[in-house]
Image (cartoon, grey):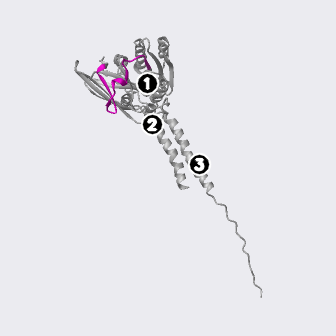
Amino acid sequence: MKKSLRSFLVLPLLAALLLLPACQTAPKVESTGEYVLQITQIDTTQFPLVNVYISVRDAAGEPQMINTGKLQLLENGQPVSNQSIQGEGEVGPLTTMLLIDNSGSMNFVGKLESAKAVAKEYLDQMRPDDQAGVIAFNTKVSVMQDVTADREALVKAIDSITARDDTAVYDALSTAIGILNPLPGRKAIIVLTDGMDNSSKATPEEALGSIGFGGLSISTVGFGQMPEGEEQTDKYKGIDEATLRMIAKSTGGQYGYTEDKAQLSALYDQMRRALQSEAVISYITPLSLRDGVQRALTVTLSDRFIGVGGESQTSFNPGGLVPEVAQPASWITFGIILTVLVLLLFIPVVVIAFTNKEPKKKKKNKIKITLKD
């Protein structure tokens, strides 16, 4: 019976551990070489087909066009054979979610108006098949315009943004990720903020952990503006650069800090051109089971003709334990399941406790024998 009890206790715990691979976090990207070769998105929604999106920039951050035939892909250190590559070249339609901080501090020295103007410049340079959405965030997250290719609707949404209250960056990221997760293709978030997050319920790790199997990149922009003439110093200048850099690095995005509209415009334009000039490699992985095991991924560029090279390393988790899993579970879902499993631990204990109870033995009446003389 003790052996049976141990089995009852071990099985739910094993089930909980097996669910962990389904709660993915975004991969960290390391890049070395003359060119900054960056894996920006890994899409495993059609697993075992894997789509790897790659951005190439020079040391100044300027996007570079490359010969995709000079790219080599390795999975777990082994080169992916040409027979496994189904397509490589330019990225198709791009979906961008623009997140704009509309906390009260954005009213200072016209920062919100600058942010809105630059966002509209970004929309003006979208390609015919591209689409975008707009989210404003202060203490509340407001989806001003869901994803659409309608430029007029997007501009109208941006124009309607006003500034007030505090900042909730990570809640806004969670909302944007939730909207983009079900969408196919290349997806990116560009988030602009002028201050520290002081109102989010979600943490940066929780937000990044909700990215689905399709993947996406997040670029972050810190926007502080110095006053002109006799205006007051910007008392809201504090920006959590460390966290903004971490978010960008962990998701294949870029981080930039700007102090005025001209710099902000140049940064958004650079980010847009980098997104629109990416390459994509699609390949069939030889490890075709969603086994929850981390896969190392390396992309190298070696072009002797123009004398440049670069290498980018990251990793991805196919998630799940069965190929039919379409999207990783969130940490909230995992917490609920784990709680249920822990409660189930007590069921066998209670059952065994009741079944092991022995009925009380009735006292037998002793027969007394008395001998008479």
> Above or below — where is 168 with respect to 144?
below
Query: Which residues are the magenta region?
Result: 69-96
State how far apart marks 2 and 3 are (Cα): 27 Å
Is disc 1 surrounded by few (<14), some (14 to 19) or many (20+) residues within 10 Å? many
Q: Are marks 1 and 2 in contact (CB under 8 Å)?
A: no
With 368 as the anchor, is 323 left or right in this view?
Answer: left
- Was residue 84 drawn as part of the magenta stretch in this picture? yes
Q: Nearer the viewer, mark 1 or mark 2?
A: 2
With 138 as the anchor, is 38 left or right in this view?
Answer: left
Mark 3 belongs to which amino acid? Answer: Ile
Q: Are marks 2 and 3 in contact (CB under 8 Å)?
A: no
Residue 65 x, y percent position in the rendering: 30, 17
Q: Quadrant of residue 108?
A: top left
Is disc 2 surrounded by few (<14), some (14 to 19) or many (20+) residues within 10 Å? many
| Sequence order check, earlier mark of 2 and 3 | 2
**Closer to us: 74 or 243:** 74
Mark 1 belongs to which amino acid? Answer: Ser
Residue tagged by mark 3?
A: 347
Residue tagged by mark 2?
A: 21
Q: Residue at x 31, y 21 (%)?
A: 56
Residue 218 x, y percent position in the rendering: 40, 25
